[in-house]
Image: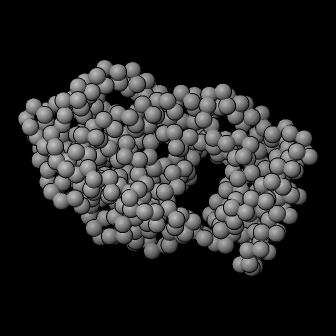
């Protein structure tokens, strides 16, 4: 079964699917947190004690990350439970396996150094620190430990934190190493929209690196598909919203199974509208807006009524409310104007630096030894975490492995 891959981070509460995405895509694949080897987890649990017993001081953010590392699994475990009614038929959980050794991270650093704009966008991306912690420590406390041992990992962190920008670059490289694997997927879905500018920039420079100077902008067919998907979602989201509870997901699963033909008709109607509006020989927004409103009123009410089983009159009333929301219509029309994903997320790319990871690192870079409280907490967490770890290890239906990026 073809599946749309949810990227770039792990299954979490911010990327729970919309019901419209279950209807539209049919099947989604979520990645569970990286780092499922028992030795890796054991090293992360024991690393604070190792450093405290030897009075080893490292940036305070490293000790924060030792705690955050495991919170990915706890949150993913909760989301697995919520999505359980949609599993197999509509949701797959997979383990994403890719090289994270020193060689790969150094190559990612070089890639960033060759394209300085990447680091600037990375600094402005609102990255979940739990995710950053998992990617960094999976590299340092597994791959580096395998190559150099724990003393070597300590030296590695010291070398990579001499200056504020050193640690930032290491974290960026660890995450960029993950992002680069996504070019192998044909169909992806991004809920955490703040990532768009960085992913698009990485794709652009990868194309150049591989001798393909094709623009990262989408062509007409891809833009029409994005228009269709966006319109489909905007119509249904006010009705069904997120798949954020088991009881709701049981209902969503039943609708997806019983309304296959009706959903297909709505997708086809959205495609007709998307194609006509996108290909209109004018860039005047008001003209496109008026025509889109006419098409939605004439084409969407019946299939919407059939999917939702609401009276046709009520479906028409709902669509009238939808058409009066200028922010929704304006957002969809941006695609009709030929705007790219990068342009669509300019606001995200321009957010204040205080919400980005650079601010967090610079305010957590004071070198300290791990506290007794942290060491004790890690021991307690180790015992509590066993059930979570075992459950996650048992539910992944497949592993997706990726070769070294060329």
| Residue found at x 40% / y 64% | 121
Q: Nearer the viewer, residue 91 or 402?
A: 91
- Residue 315 is left or right of residue 386, and the answer is right
Residue 254: quarter of image: top right
Q: Nearer the viewer, residue 304 or 186?
A: 304
Please, which colouring scheme is shown?
one colour
- Residue 52 is left or right of residue 404, and the answer is left
In this view, 397 is above or below 157 = above
Image quarter where the N terminus lies is top right
| Residue found at x 53% / y 27% | 81
| Residue found at x 40% / y 71% | 208
Residue 9 placement (x, y as % from top left): 44, 46
Q: Residue furthest left?
A: 54
Residue 120 placement (x, y as % from top left): 36, 66
In this view, 335 is above or below 320 = below
Residue 385 placement (x, y as % from top left): 35, 24
In this view, 196 is above or below 75 = below
Does residue 141 appear in the picture of this structure?
A: yes
Image quarter where the C terminus lies is bottom left
Residue 176 placement (x, y as % from top left): 35, 56
| Residue found at x 46% / y 29% | 77
Does residue 181 appear in the picture of this structure?
A: no
- Residue 405 is left or right of residue 369, and the answer is right
So how many labels did they put on this image?
0
Residue 161: quarter of image: bottom left
């Amino acid at each position: 079964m073809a599946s749309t891959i949810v990227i770039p981070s792990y299954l979490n509460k911010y990327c729970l699917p919309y019901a419209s995405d279950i209807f539209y895509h049919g099947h989604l694949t979520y990645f569970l947190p990286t780092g499922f080897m028992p030795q890796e987890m054991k090293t992360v649990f024991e690393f604070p004690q190792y450093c405290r017993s030897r009075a080893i001081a490292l940036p305070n953010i490293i000790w924060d990350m030792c705690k955050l590392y495991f919170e990915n699994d706890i949150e993913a475990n909760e989301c697995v439970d919520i999505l359980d009614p949609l599993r197999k038929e509509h949701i797959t959980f997979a383990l994403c396996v890719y090289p994270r050794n020193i060689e790969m991270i150094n190559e990612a650093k070089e890639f960033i150094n060759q394209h300085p704009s990447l680091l600037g966008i990375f600094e402005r991306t609102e990255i979940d620190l739990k995710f950053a912690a998992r990617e960094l420590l999976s590299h340092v406390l597994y791959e580096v430990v395998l190559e150099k041992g724990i003393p070597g990992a300590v030296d590695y962190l010291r070398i990579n934190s001499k200056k504020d920008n050193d640690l930032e670059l290491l974290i960026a490289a660890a995450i960029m190493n993950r992002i680069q694997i996504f070019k192998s997927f044909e169909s992806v879905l991004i809920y955490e929209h703040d990532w768009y500018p960085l992913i698009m920039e990485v794709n652009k420079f990868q194309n150049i690196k591989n001798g393909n100077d094709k623009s990262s902008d989408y062509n007409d067919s891809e833009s029409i598909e994005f228009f269709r998907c966006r319109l489909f979602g905007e119509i249904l989201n006010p009705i069904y919203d997120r798949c954020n509870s088991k009881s709701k997901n049981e209902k969503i699963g039943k609708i997806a199974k019983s309304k296959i033909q009706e959903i297909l008709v709505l997708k086809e109607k959205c495609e007709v509208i998307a194609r006509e509006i996108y290909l209109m020989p004018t860039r005047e927004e008001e003209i496109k807006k008026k025509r889109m409103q006419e098409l939605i009123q004439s084409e969407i009410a019946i299939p919407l009524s059939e999917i939702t089983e609401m009276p046709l009159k009520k479906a028409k009333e709902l669509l009238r409310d939808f058409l009066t929301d200028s922010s929704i219509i304006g957002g969809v029309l941006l695609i009709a104007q030929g705007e790219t994903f990068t342009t669509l997320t300019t606001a995200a790319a321009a957010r204040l630096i205080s919400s980005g990871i650079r601010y967090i690192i610079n305010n957590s870079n004071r070198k300290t030894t791990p506290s007794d409280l942290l060491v004790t907490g890690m021991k307690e967490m180790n015992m509590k975490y066993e059930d979570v770890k075992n459950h996650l290890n048992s539910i992944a239906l497949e592993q997706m492995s990726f070769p070294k990026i060329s």
